Structure formats: structure tokens, C-alpha cells
């Protein structure tokens, strides 16, 4: 098994940043960032907290009878699946509630590979590292299509790469790490490529609530037996630790995915599903709008500072991240460590996301200290 | 993929029982079982409710800050792993917290198969149906060793069956469905068989708190690089729906299991882990003792009625189940349906557990209506 997935590198950077934070080193104190504090722009964990109804759901659950603490249906609480199906305009039978988007992607990739003749998985470069990790675990072969410089994916490049060996195409929109949001024409053509090769398009839309461009188009709007959409409440409700996600499968392969889900996990955790159901029903649109606006403002603040620092970057259309390249300072792990030591800002080295962006550094904007980080970077470069 | 695992059959029986309960049929009203009510002895869901500290843990969690709602460490909350490691006298690094025993068994089987030369999995007959289901999903070959008539497993029979093809031996003690508890000599010899064939013994001990015999011996007491022990809090804390389990791996394969866990699930659900940690620390021994005693009393009540009904059965030494055989009434699905219709008692057909007990019916004693069920069965036969 290939162990080359995100977290080990992620943990190494986090550990290094923690150690630096505990040293007697100091960096410019700006805003609420103290002089001795490293600003964490490594992880994609939302910092704004879950909706109140989510907390209330956990409290309600704690007082339920003995039965409510037993197995939920394997494919998820029926009311949660119905609520998801109604919102996404799909049949409840197509929805499997999973242990986060992580399991949703695993089930989707496994099911698509099982029904395909070939065993090639087309991924993008840069890529979210779990996709090649899962590809390797499932015994399939990854092939990479480079994105455009601004992170957009040209579906013609995917069509050119696709062959009779192609079982699966995996994309993520809004995209981690590039911030690209695929428009409707792109998504439609990606589905068509999958159809034309008897393959499956897997579209991971976990950042769908964080589209700043207004151009985001869910693959669910394109009806096809050759596309699977995955999602989760991890980012939209700021609950990456609750592990509630879902996948929407074509009717022909949903039973296969349910089987694997049952054999791997039996079911997901019930209090988490119960609380998400309540939050889904009761959280006002303002909660989601406010967090999206906060993120858009942070993008402004941070990219202004990158301009000041003379860095190259692409302004994200969605998701949580900005990738930047500093002249003469490629985004190696060593330089990421140096940036922690000398500027007090921790990012992720671009090499974690494939070869196309190995000179870049990814900064996650899920911290209230974006302004302070921007000031430190502008001063350092 | 083979879809022949427990739940579909389980659901069919549950559905049939629910339909019968909604009909205008009536059976003897006994104790708290109303005349129109089918007594559910199908599922293994504890009926006595979680410890109070578990509920309190969920309430506490609901009030924590935004950070506490984000990813726990992939391998589980460190304090939970430490608490488990201290209780089981193993190194914290060997412990992976999983999404219930279901995921623990999946990770264990996958890791053991990856490091083995052969791809044969030795299972018992009767068998807990998830084991052959997982074996098939992992592309390995199951071979079955029949247990003794009373459910005991003769390790000599396992040794006779083992070969250079053997990668894994999977056992469950206390046993579902037979109620057998393997003594120390049996467990020791099973580990030796695994060692002698460069294979792994997987010992699923999820019912370890329900040993009525005093003879239960955990495989953890036998130090070996060739055994994995899985467990969960599902039965001991009456929380099958929270999905918190764990596996204890030999140092040589624990990283492999952590990788797969990360690639499949990223992490388990954090509120569930938090609540289990609190319950593990604060629940008095009386909680566990009381539930074990309740179960032992139900065994007495139920087997007395089986004596009266002239049924053949093995008195369980542990776990939640009694298997019984009624003269001229083999435990087929049709007869299980007939028993629901005519006696108002729902059990599981023996054919769900392999071939050795297809004439038998499994009754789960996790209902306060065991006495009423016993009376109905004694009257019916």
C-alpha cells in the first residue's frame, strides 16, 4: 500500500509549527497574533464553530431512550437521507450517508472500479492527496491531467487522456488546493467524457457552500448513470470531526456501495447524524452566508498582502485556500519550515499536492488571524 | 462482491415481525408483552441503556469550542487510546480506535491478508456472517471448521485445516451465535497455530463483558506478533449506534492498519469518542456487573422454558444468544415466519450462520420480555 497521503506531511508541518510556537522565538505581533505565536494556515478546519442547532441536537440526543443509542440503518437515518434527497432533488434510495466525505469518496471509487472494465483513474495535478492514496489502496492506476495555470480544468485535456482503460475520473469543485470552481460547461463535458468511455465521473463537492464566483454547478444537475456526487457537512457546518457525509449514486451501483459500507463500517455514528439532521432543518441561511462572506473577505485581505509581497497567486473562486509562489523561494518542505521559523506563518508545501505546484505554498484561510499572517508575509518578503 | 451477509435476512425477519405486530393477530399476553405484540429476539441491540456518564459526555461535548468539533487524530483521541492501552496492558501505539468492531475487524482482516503469502481465511461454522462477507469483499477464500455440538472450538481441528495457504484465522469469544467461551488453552493453541503457519489469529472479543462462566481469556494475555484483538464499547455500554471500537495490532502491522483507516474513514466520530472516554473513566463496575447478571438471569428463564418445550439447546457461557432446535421444526426462514405468526416470538434462522446450525433458531436475549417469550414458546411447542 502506498502511504503517500496528506496527513503525515500535514502532521510534520503542524508539529514543526507547534515546536516553533513553544520556542522563545518572536515574530511581529499583529492584531490578535501574539509575538510568540505561529499562525496556523495548514489545516482546513473551519474556525467559526457549528450552528447552534447542531449543538442542540447533541443535547437532545443525550436524553433519548436506550433504543436511540442502537444501530441506525446502515445507509443512514431515514429522515436524514430524505432531507438530503429533497434538497438535492434525487431519490432517497440513491443517497448513502457516510463517515464523512472521506468514506463517501472511498465507496464511490471502489464501486466505480468494480463495474468498470479498465482500472485507470484520471486525477488532476495538483490533486487532493487522498485521491491518489485511495487509488493505490484500491489497486488501480492513477494518471494525472495538469490543470491550467489558474487551476481551471480543461475537459478537452481529460478527453484526450481518457481511454478504454479509464474507469473513473475524480474531480473536486470548488477545488482544494487551487480554489478553482468548474463552470457548468466543464462539468457537463466531464460527465460526457465519462459516458463516452463507459467510466464514472466522481465529483467531490464538499466546498459547495464556499463558492465566491456564483458559477458553481453541481454535477447532480446533469442527469447521468455515469456520475457520482460526494459531499459532507464537515465544511458547511464546521464539523470536520463529526464525520457525516454522503454520496449520491446512480441506481445501478448504489446497492454495491451500500454493501461495502455495511461490510466496512456497519453504519455511521448516530448522535452525529441526529445532530446534523436537526441542524440541516433549523439552521438559517444567514449562518452559511456569513461564513462564506467571512471567507471571501479573508481572500481579499490575504491576496492584498500577497500583492504587497510581490508573490504570484491565483485568486480562489471558492473553497478555503490560496496557493502562492514567492520569487526565489520555492514551496519545499524546508522553505515551509523556514517560513515558520522566520515569518511565524505555517502553510503546506505544494509538493503535497502533486508535481504541478511543487514550487507553491498552500495557505488555508480558516483562521481569524489571516490579517496578521498577511502582514507578517508582506514584511518578510 | 458477495452480498450474503447478515443484515438483509435480519431486516426481512424484522419487517415480517413488524407487519405481524401491526396485524390484528393475538398471542398470549404475558407479563409486559401485550396480546398484539411480537416479541423481538432478532437483534443484538442491548436494551438497558448507556451509562449516565456516556450521556453526560455528549452534553459536555455539545458545549465545547469550535476546535473540539474538528477532526480528532485519525487513530482516535489520544486520551481514549491511552485509557484503552492502560486497561488492556498494551502499548498505546498498538491501539487504533475504529468505527465500531465492524471497522476494527475489517482493518484487521485486510492488514493480515496483506502481509500473508496465502489468501485463505479459516472461519468457524456456525459463523458470525460479517466474517465471510468481509472475506469475500477482500478477495480472500473462506474455509470453515465446524465447532463441537456445544459450540466449543477444538483447536486441533483448526490445526488440521491450516496450511501454507492460511493467512488468517478469525474467532469470536464469547461467541455469537453459540454462546461458547474459549478457555485459555484453546486461545493459546489458536495463537500457536497462527504462529506455526506464519498467519494471524484475529480474536473478536466484543462480548467480553458478558462471560457467565468465568473462563473467558483474552487473546491479549498471550503475547504474539501473530494475533490481533478487536473489541468495541457497543455491547458493554449498550451503544451499538455510537460506533466506537478498537483493535490492538502487533507493532509490525499497526501502521498498515492506520493507513487503511485513514484512507477509508479519515477518522471516527469525535463526540462518540469523547463520550466513551468519559464513560470509560467514570462508570462504576456495578453498571457492567448488573447487566451481566441480568443477562445470566435471562438465560436461566429462557432455558427453563426451552426444557419445558422439549427443545434441544446449548446453555450459553457468554454473549447474548441462545440457539435452540425444536423437534420436527427446523430453523428455516419459513419456520421462523411461522413462529412469528403462531407464537408471537421472532428469532433468527440458523441458516444465517452457516450450514452447521441450519436446523436451529437463534434467540437474542436483549429484551425485557424474555420471560414472556419463554412462556409463549413453552405453550406453543
Image: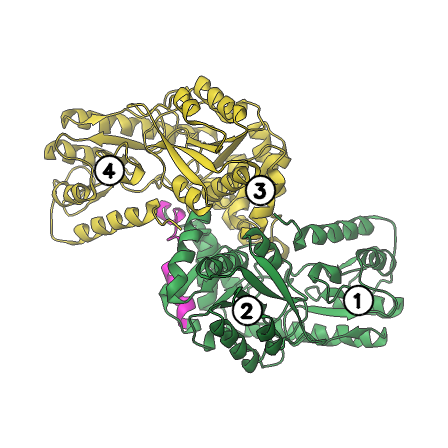
Chain colours: A yellow, B green
Give the mark nearer the N terminus: 2 vs 1.
2
- Marks 3 and 1: same chain? no
Res. B210 image quadrant: bottom right
Label 2 resides on the chain identified as: B
Mark carried by residue B163:
2
| Both labels 4 and 1 in a single chain | no
Check if residue A49 falls in the magenta segment.
no
Q: Is residue A376 above or below residue B21?
A: above
Q: Are marks 2 and 1 in contact (CB under 8 Å)?
A: no
Q: Which residue is mark 3?
A: A257
Which residue is located at x 37 percent, y 24 percent?
Answer: A153
User: Please, is residue A265 above or below residue A345 in the view?
Assistant: below
Contact (Cβ within 8 Å) of mark 4 with mark 1: no
Residue shown at the point (62%, 80%) measured from the top left: B213
Residue indicated by mark 1? B372
Find numbered disc 1 in the image and state the secondary structure of the residue it sits on: helix
Classify the position of the C terminus of chain B by image quarter.
bottom right
Q: Residues within 10 Å of mark 2 (few under 14, many from 20)?
A: some
Q: Is residue B310 above or below residue A245?
A: below
Q: Distance between the Cα atoms at labels 4 and 2? A: 61 Å
Q: Which residues are magenta?
A: B66-86
User: In this rendering, which labeled residue sits more in front, label 4 or label 3?
Assistant: 3
Where is residue A309 shown, x and y percent of the image?
14, 28
**Which residue is found at the position 65% from the left and 74% from the top?**
B180
Please provide percent x and percent y for residue B236: 56, 66
Count neighbours of disc 1 (C-alpha within 10 A) and say few if under 14, some if 14 to 19, many if 20 or more: many
Badge 3: residue crowd in 10 Å (few <14, some 14–19, many ≥20): many
Q: Position of residue A93 (x, y in %)?
A: 64, 36
CB-based contact (under 8 Å), mark 4 and mark 2: no
Name the residue carrying label 4.
A369
Q: Which label sits in the foreground, 3 or 1? A: 3
Amino acid at each position: 500500500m502506498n502511504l503517500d497521503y496528506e496527513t503525515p506531511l500535514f502532521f510534520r508541518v503542524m508539529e514543526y509549527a507547534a515546536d516553533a510556537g513553544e520556542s522563545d522565538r518572536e515574530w511581529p505581533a499583529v492584531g490578535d497574533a501574539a509575538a510568540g505565536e505561529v499562525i496556523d494556515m495548514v489545516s482546513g478546519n473551519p474556525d467559526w464553530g457549528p450552528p447552534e442547532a447542531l449543538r442542540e441536537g447533541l443535547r437532545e440526543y443525550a436524553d433519548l431512550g436506550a433504543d436511540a443509542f442502537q444501530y441506525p440503518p446502515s445507509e443512514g437515518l431515514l429522515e436524514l437521507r430524505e432531507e438530503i434527497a429533497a434538497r438535492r432533488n434525487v431519490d432517497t434510495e440513491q443517497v448513502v450517508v457516510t463517515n464523512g466525505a472521506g468514506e463517501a469518496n472511498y465507496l464511490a471509487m471502489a464501486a466505480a472500479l468494480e463495474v468498470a472494465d479498465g482500472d485507470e483513474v484520471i486525477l488532476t495535478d495538483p490533486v487532493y492527496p487522498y485521491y491518489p492514496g485511495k487509488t493505490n489502496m484500491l489497486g488501480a492506476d492513477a494518471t494525472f491531467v495538469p490543470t491550467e495555470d489558474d487551476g481551471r480544468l480543461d475537459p478537452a485535456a481529460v478527453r484526450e487522456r481518457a481511454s478504454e482503460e479509464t474507469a473513473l475520473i475524480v474531480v473536486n469543485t470548488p477545488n482544494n488546493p487551487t480554489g478553482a470552481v468548474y463552470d457548468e460547461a466543464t462539468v457537463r463535458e466531464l460527465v460526457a467524457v465519462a459516458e463516452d468511455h463507459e467510466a464514472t465521473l466522481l465529483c467531490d463537492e464538499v466546498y459547495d457552500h464556499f463558492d465566491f464566483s456564483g458559477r458553481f454547478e453541481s454535477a447532480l444537475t446533469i442527469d447521468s448513470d455515469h456520475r457520482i456526487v460526494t459531499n459532507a457537512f464537515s465544511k458547511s457546518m464546521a464539523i470536520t470531526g463529526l464525520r457525516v457525509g454522503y454520496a449520491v449514486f446512480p441506481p445501478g451501483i448504489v446497492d454495491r456501495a451500500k454493501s461495502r459500507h455495511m461490510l466496512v463500517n456497519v453504519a455511521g455514528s448516530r448522535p452525529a447524524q441526529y445532530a446534523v439532521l436537526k441542524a440541516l432543518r433549523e439552521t438559517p441561511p444567514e449562518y452559511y452566508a456569513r461564513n462564506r462572506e467571512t471567507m471571501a473577505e479573508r481572500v481579499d485581505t490575504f491576496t492584498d498582502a500577497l500583492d504587497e509581497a510581490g508573490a504570484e497567486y491565483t485568486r480562489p473562486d471558492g473553497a478555503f485556500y490560496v496557493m502562492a509562489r514567492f520569487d526565489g523561494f520555492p514551496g519545499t518542505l524546508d522553505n515551509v519550515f523556514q517560513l515558520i521559523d522566520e515569518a511565524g506563518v505555517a502553510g503546506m508545501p505544494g509538493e503535497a499536492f502533486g508535481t504541478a505546484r511543487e514550487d507553491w505554498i498552500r495557505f488555508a484561510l480558516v483562521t481569524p488571524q489571516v490579517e496578521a499572517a498577511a502582514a507578517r508575509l508582506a514584511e518578510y518578503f
